[in-house]
Amino acid sequence: MLNSKFSVANATLGNSDRYTAESQVLSIMLETDTAILDLRSERYFTLNDVGTRVWELLQEGTEVAVIVELLVEEYDAPIEVIAADTRDILIALLRRRLVRRV
């Protein structure tokens, strides 16, 4: 089962949290991947197909726990693996200041 809370840089992230792209971040889908451009740093990042799906769901305002549930339905992997991967993607996006809590 997904842990109810985890931490990154003194912030606690919970299952009911919602995130969205920062205002200075642009993204575009490329086939199954997503390219993300941070206009502040002029750096770009890419997300694979799972990262892209997480990104899409974040932009729709989906709660973290619901993202995990949807990914479990869409991919053939145990919930523990999906939850850990989702957490890792979210932490990476937060550390790079590409998303913010809403």
Image (cartoon, rainbow, N blue to C red):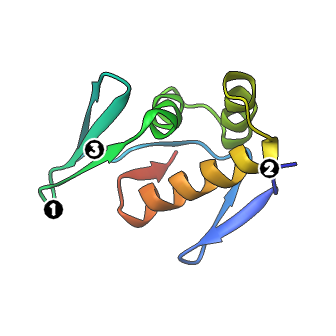
Of badges 2 and 1, the one in the foreground is 2
- Residue position for label 3: 23
Of badges 1 and 3, the one in the foreground is 1
Amino acid, disc 3: Ser
Discs 2, 3 touching: Cβ within 8 Å? no
The numbered disc on residue 41 is 1
- Bin the neighbour count of mark 3 within 10 Å (Cα to Cα): few under 14, some 14-19, many 20 and up: few
| Cα distance between the residues tagged 1 and 3 | 13 Å
- In the image shown, does 82 or 92 lie closer to the viewer? 82
Amino acid, disc 1: Ser
- In the image shown, does 86 or 98 lie closer to the viewer? 86
Position of residue 96 relative to residue 33, above or below, is: below
Q: Would you say 57 lies left or right of 95 here?
A: right
- Residue position for label 2: 80
Q: How many marks are shown on the rendered structure?
A: 3
Q: Quadrant of residue 65?
A: top right
Q: Would you say 94 lies left or right of 67 here?
A: left
- Bin the neighbour count of mark 2 within 10 Å (Cα to Cα): few under 14, some 14-19, many 20 and up: some
Which residue is at 65% across, 47% downward? 17
- Bin the neighbour count of mark 1 within 10 Å (Cα to Cα): few under 14, some 14-19, many 20 and up: few
Position of residue 75 relative to residue 5, above or below, is: above
Q: Position of residue 97 (x, y in %)?
A: 36, 60
Amino acid, disc 2: Glu
| Cα distance between the residues tagged 2 and 3 | 32 Å
Q: Quadrant of residue 34?
A: top left
Q: Position of residue 38 (x, y in %)?
A: 21, 51
